[in-house]
Image (cartoon, rainbow, N blue to C red):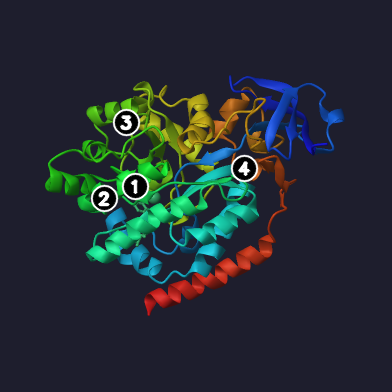
């Protein structure tokens, strides 16, 4: 007999965005939703209570660098270029595999606490990331980030080759919860000849690609100077754009680039908090959506955010989307919540982000019994504009309970925090030597 779990006595956010009273019955072994409907508790071996709560799809963080939690608050208030070159890259040069293990666990606890069940990760020491994901019970699309600028030919080729090898090695790890992608950092930080050599190899390996696109004007100028075209056209010519590819940011995309992304089916992971903090600009999210592009949400690394609470991104995406469009009706509440759930799942290629029979059992149960959520006119409005990660009571991923009544079950949280503090201090000391 299969293990079953029922989420009982709550209200459920349906794929149509109706809110209905229903239980959710889950096959915990298969990690799938069996049924959504009334009175299913009797059929289950284990139950979790959702009284006064809203059961929503687990949030999907579609762009980030989990280990960068160790650099949270390390360097703030700078442009992207200065911040990376003066602070982040020197610190990352000192990062060890153990730092990645510790930092990714810290990120995992934060994600679970705020109802995120799937995330994307572009970093290095990917084996450590995979181990942390396995232990956390989360779902992730991970990859090794490639930078070739400043490297000699051999080191550059090794870096890209490693990204392909890592993607092949770990795809399907952690009972299939880990999927992979080849992750060249950005069009301007990887040389053309390396894209030409390795993109076909990534396609042969059957894995997606993920990279930063048009994050700042400076980055666009670099491609313009080198190739005389917009970066999206440059990426398209190199075969980088496809349905299973998703890009981060897409801040400064013009009308023809928006059309290209939509035509290729390449999703955009919008990172509003990171874009505001680094003053990168305002992504034309409503225009992307109107063109038919899939838009997901990401936090980016914690060092440019400075947390991993996707409820902030939902709210920021709605707010910034209105400002960018100069239209208060742009990026409405439902749209913003959809980007953080089904948009992210579609971008990352997971059958999650919807609470319906047959989908992955990835859920967040949000406690609506709170002063800042009173009164209730429209729960979807609350999810977009008033709820926060700390309102999440239970987190379920792949049919397993990762957090119950705000108690994270998969890690010793105090131990994770203590080790993160130690590793962050030692890292900062090495970087300043
Ligand atoms: N193997 C590469 C590492 C690339 S990982 C991905 C990189 O993205 C960097 N990163 C973090 N946030 C941002 C951002 O907002 N824009 C661009 N890069 C970022 C991060 O610091 C990390 O170095 C190397 O040898 O340097
Ligand atoms: Zn990034």
* 93 to 171, vertically: above or below: below
- Viewer-proximal residue among 204 and 113: 204
Measured in 3D between alpha carbons, the distance from the residue under mark 3 to the one under mark 1, in whole angstroms, is: 22 Å
Q: Read off the residue under disc 4.
A: 115
**Of callouts 3 and 1, which one flags the residue occurring earlier in the amino acid sequence?**
1
Q: What's the residue at 63%, 34% (across, down)? A: 360
Q: CA distance from mark 2 to mark 4?
A: 39 Å
Q: In the image, is 109 to the left or to the right of 23?
A: left
Q: Which residue is mark 2?
A: 197
The residue that appears at 48% across and 58% down in the rendered structure is 126
Q: Nearer the viewer, mark 3 or mark 1?
A: 1
The residue that label 1 is drawn on is 201
Q: Using the rendered image of the protein, determine whether residue 305 is visible from the camera's viewpoint.
A: no
Mark toward the start of the polypeptide (4 vs 1): 4
State how far apart marks 4 and 1 are (Cα). 36 Å
Asked if marks 1 and 2 touch (Cβ < 8 Å), the reply is yes
């Amino acid at each position: 007999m299969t293990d079953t779990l029922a989420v009982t006595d709550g209200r459920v956010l349906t794929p149509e965005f109706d809110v209905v009273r229903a239980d959710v019955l889950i096959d915990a072994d298969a990690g799938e939703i069996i049924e959504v409907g009334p009175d299913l508790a009797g059929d289950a071996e284990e139950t979790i209570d959702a009284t006064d709560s809203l059961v929503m799809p687990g949030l999907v963080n579609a762009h980030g660098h989990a280990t960068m939690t160790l650099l949270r608050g390390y360097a703030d208030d700078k442009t992207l270029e200065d911040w990376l070159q003066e602070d982040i890259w020197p610190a990352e040069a000192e990062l060890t595999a153990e730092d990645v293990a510790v930092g990714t666990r810290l990120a995992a606890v934060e994600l679970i606490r705020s109802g995120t069940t799937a995330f994307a990760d572009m970093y290095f020491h990917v084996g450590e990331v995979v181990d942390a994901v396995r232990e956390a019970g989360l779902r992730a699309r991970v990859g090794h980030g490639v930078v070739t600028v400043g490297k000699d030919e051999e080191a550059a080729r090794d870096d890209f080759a490693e990204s392909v090898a890592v993607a092949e090695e770990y795809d399907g790890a952690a009972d299939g919860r880990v999927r992979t992608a080849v992750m060249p950092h950005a069009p301007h930080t990887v040389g053309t000849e390396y894209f030409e050599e390795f993109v076909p190899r990534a396609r042969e390996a059957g894995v997606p690609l993920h990279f930063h696109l048009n994050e700042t004007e400076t980055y666009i100028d670099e491609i313009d100077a080198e190739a005389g075209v917009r970066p999206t056209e440059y990426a398209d010519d190199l075969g980088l754009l496809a349905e299973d590819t998703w890009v981060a940011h897409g801040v400064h995309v013009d009308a023809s680039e928006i059309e290209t992304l939509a035509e290729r089916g390449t999703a955009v992971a919008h990172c509003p908090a990171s874009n505001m903090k680094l003053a990168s600009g305002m992504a034309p999210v409503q225009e992307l959506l109107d063109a038919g592009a899939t838009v997901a949400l990401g936090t980016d690394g914690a060092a440019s955010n400075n947390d991993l609470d996707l409820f902030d991104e939902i709210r920021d995406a709605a707010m910034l989307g209105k400002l960018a469009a100069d239209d208060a009706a742009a990026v409405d509440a439902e749209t913003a919540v959809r980007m953080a759930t089904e948009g992210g799942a579609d971008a990352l290629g997971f059958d999650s982000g919807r609470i319906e029979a047959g989908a992955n059992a990835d859920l967040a149960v949000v406690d609506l019994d709170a002063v800042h959520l009173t009164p209730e006119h429209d729960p979807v409005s609350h999810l977009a504009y008033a709820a926060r990660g700390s309102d999440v009571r239970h987190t379920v991923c792949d049919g397993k309970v990762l957090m119950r009544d705000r108690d994270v079950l998969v890690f010793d949280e105090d131990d994770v925090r203590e080790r993160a503090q130690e590793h962050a201090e030692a890292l900062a000391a090495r970087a300043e030597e």
